[in-house]
Every structure is written in structure tokens, then in C-alpha cells.
Amino acid sequence: MLFFRSEERVREWCAARGYRMRPLVTMDQLWTLATTWYSTRLQENSRRPQPDEMRSIFTRLGLGGDFWDPQSDSFG
Amino acid sequence: MSLDTQTKLAIYRHFAETGQRPSVEVVAERVRSDVSSVREAFLTLRAQRVLVLEPDGVSIRMAPPFSGVATQHVVIVDDTKYFANCAWDSFGIPAALHRPAQIHSRCAQSGEQLNLEIGLEGPPSCSWLFHCLVPAARWWDDIVFT
């Protein structure tokens, strides 16, 4: 999970390593993910999002499909 | 409150206060329990994916979003320096602490420095991107690589 200056830099990084390029996430989307995951982390009743919640969070941000599905078996 | 929950809170509060991982002895002191019981709690928290431990089974590698070891993702909150496990977690530290932060990282391809001021409402307008190589269903197969 890395930062990149641009889409072109992501493409170069993936090509150099033979990796498939994955969906890109903006800084605003990343902030929403971070606050959703971690804003209660220092509290007694905090817990990690469950798969259904994860799917819902990703979908609300426009991050859909098998790649973001925590229970997908499409990536052998 | 269960010892597992006390242990989790003690670990996170230590990270929040110091930016450093606590030893099992320090956590035991904070929760007023014995080291053996706290070591068992560490293993329970690892099974719950709250902690990632080093191969010794007792040193904390990750208490997401905090990293127990130095990384390329540095977060400054007030005067405390933290290391994040990844780009996502570098945003997660100010989110967890509910404090403004400075993020210092770099482009994984070019090495260009990223210096970002995060406010309570999030980052300023910014064209940098986040890329995750591993599908969500596989994140915990090897969370350090993810």
C-alpha cells in the first residue's frame, strides 16, 4: 500500500515488477478509508470492520468489484 | 474489562503517547498483570488481527495504524514522531489520534518526497495517488507484504 506521484508512476512501478495495475485511490478516498477504519481505534469498544461492512464502505467510495471484495475468491 | 481489551488499550495508548512499541513487560505493568498472562493476550489479539507480532511471538511489529519498526511513512503529530505501516496507515494515525499531522513519505517509483499537512478534516487538495497491489481478500495472507 504505497503512495505515487501520478498514474504514470504507478504504471511504471507495476511494469518494472511484472505486477498487474490495480484500481487507483485518491487522497480524499484514502482519508475516508483511514477515518472509517481507525477513528475509534484507541477506544475500548473499537473493532475492525467486518466483511459486509468493508464491502459497504468500499462501495460507497466507488471502490467496487472483486478486487475490493474481502471475501472474493476470484484471485487465486 | 477483559485482560485482552486492557492489553489492547495499553498497547495503543503507549504507541499514541510515545510513538514507540511497548515491550510485554511495560504492557504488563500498565495493566497490573503478569507477563505470562499478557503474552497470552498478545496471541489472542494477533488471532483477532489487532496485532502483528515478530517471529519471537512477543515483539510488536504492527498495531495498525502504528508500526513498531521504522518505515518510509513518517507521521508527526504535535512533537511526537510515529511510523505507519503503509500509506493507508499514515492517514490512519491522525485519524486515530484525532489530531492534525504532517505526513512525510515518498513516491514508490520516483522517490519524490511527499510532505502533506493533514487537518482534522483531512488532506488538502492533492493529486498524489494511493495504490494497493494485493486484493482485499488476500491482505492478511501476508500483511507485512500488503
Image (tube, rainbow, N blue to C red):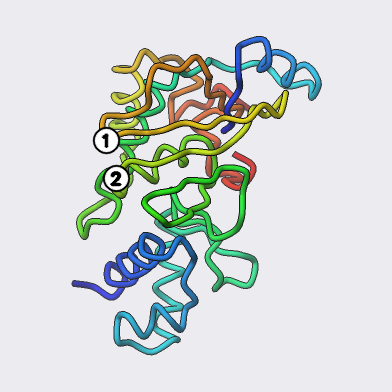
A40 displayed left or right of A19: left
A45 displayed left or right of A26: left
**Percent coordinates x, y for residue A33 in the rendering:** 36, 30
User: Quadrant of the rendered structure where residue B29 is?
Assistant: bottom left
Name the residue type under label 1: Leu
Name the residue type under label 2: Arg
How would you rate the neighbour count of disc 2 (Cα within 10 Å): few for under 14, some for 14-19, many for 20 or more? some
Circle 1 SS class: loop
B140 displayed left or right of B56: left
Residue B99: numbered disc? 2
Q: Residue at x 31, y 40 (%)?
A: A49
Q: Residue at x 36, y 59 (%)?
A: B16
Q: Residue at x 41, y 56 (%)?
A: B79
Circle 2 SS class: loop
In the picture, the quarter occupied by the N terminus of chain B is bottom left
Label 2 chain ID? B
Q: Is residue B129 above or below residue A48?
A: above
In the picture, the quarter occupied by the C terminus of chain B is top right
**Percent coordinates x, y for residue B22 in the rendering:** 46, 72
Of residues B97 and B67, the one nearer the viewer is B97
